[in-house]
Amino acid sequence: MADTRIILPQWDELANLPDEALPLLPTALLIASDEYPALDPAEYDRMLQAHADHLRVEVDATREWPRKIAAINHHLFNEVGYSGDNDEYYDPRNSYLNEVFERRLGNPISLALVQMEVARRLGLPLEGISFPGHFLVRLPVDDGVLIMDPFNGGRPLGVDELRERAQSNLGGQAPDDSVLAQILDPAPHRAILMRMLRNLHGVYAERGEWDRAARSADRILKLAPEQADAMRDRGLAYLQLEHLAGARTDLSRYLKMEPDAADAGSIRDQLIEIGGERPRLH
């Protein structure tokens, strides 16, 4: 068996883990293993370690964290060639870490995971930010935090640009300093992994690949069983797959979890149509 420091967890053990114990990179590779069951985590451990080993002398010789992360970014994005996939942004391969390592292409969140893991191995506490519309990363510095965009080569972002980006995803309302600071809080591991899975669900639902859409929603529920939107999404995917028993169970539970949801009426109509709920007499 391959010797690796990356040990894939089991799906059924994740829901009960506190966030700080939820392994980020191994679980991201676990997500990829659903689509690529033969992937070898040791291979990607070696790739990551090679990146870190290449950088270690330079990073250790530098005291300032902004210069350390600049060296990491230069190596990953300029020398090795990781980059954002602008041509096929919604290609599901951009969400599967094994493909990101091999193709050197990804979306914001998958590139952030590579950047974060290399930084972690070099002693830098690089963290993810679940920024609206576009995942970012942050590094604490003496006078605040350095915010970077991994999809665009780790480019640093200033306050004005951050405010403008947030505004376009918040109904045109520019966030004040307190709201922006809250948006820039570090994302918990569970939230990062769920965002990856929501991205995959959205891609597969758009393509009509309902088996994979159902799987993506199911994996969200493995991480957070009380996620009502994932319960609904899995039920609707089951409905498309004509797995009516599963659809009835999930959609009925969704209505119990969110009886006043905006889509509750349409979900009830679909349940009635498939025999899952009877209309009430008034």
Image (tube, rainbow, N blue to C red):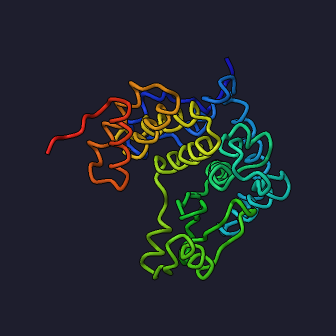
Q: Which of 137 and 59 is in front in this view?
A: 137
Asked if residue 57 shows in the view, the reply is: no
Which residue does the image show at 75% across and 42% down from the upper left? 101
Q: In this view, does 136 lie above or below 229?
A: below
Asked if residue 270 shows in the view, the reply is: yes
Judged from this view, the residue extending furthest toward the right is 79
Judged from this view, the residue extending furthest toward the front is 282
Residue 212 screen position, x and y as percent: 58, 33
Does residue 147 appear to the left or right of 241 in the view shown?
right
Residue 216 screen position, x and y as percent: 53, 37
Q: Is residue 82 above or below residue 256?
A: below
Q: Nearer the viewer, residue 248 or 171?
A: 248
Which residue does the image show at 58% across and 40% down from the upper left? 28
Does residue 14 appear to the left or right of 143 in the view shown?
left
Does residue 206 appear to the left or right of 255 in the view shown?
right
Q: In which quarter of the image is the N terminus?
A: top right
Q: Which of 260 and 52 is in front in this view?
A: 260
Q: In which quarter of the image is the C terminus?
A: top left
Residue 201 screen position, x and y as percent: 56, 43
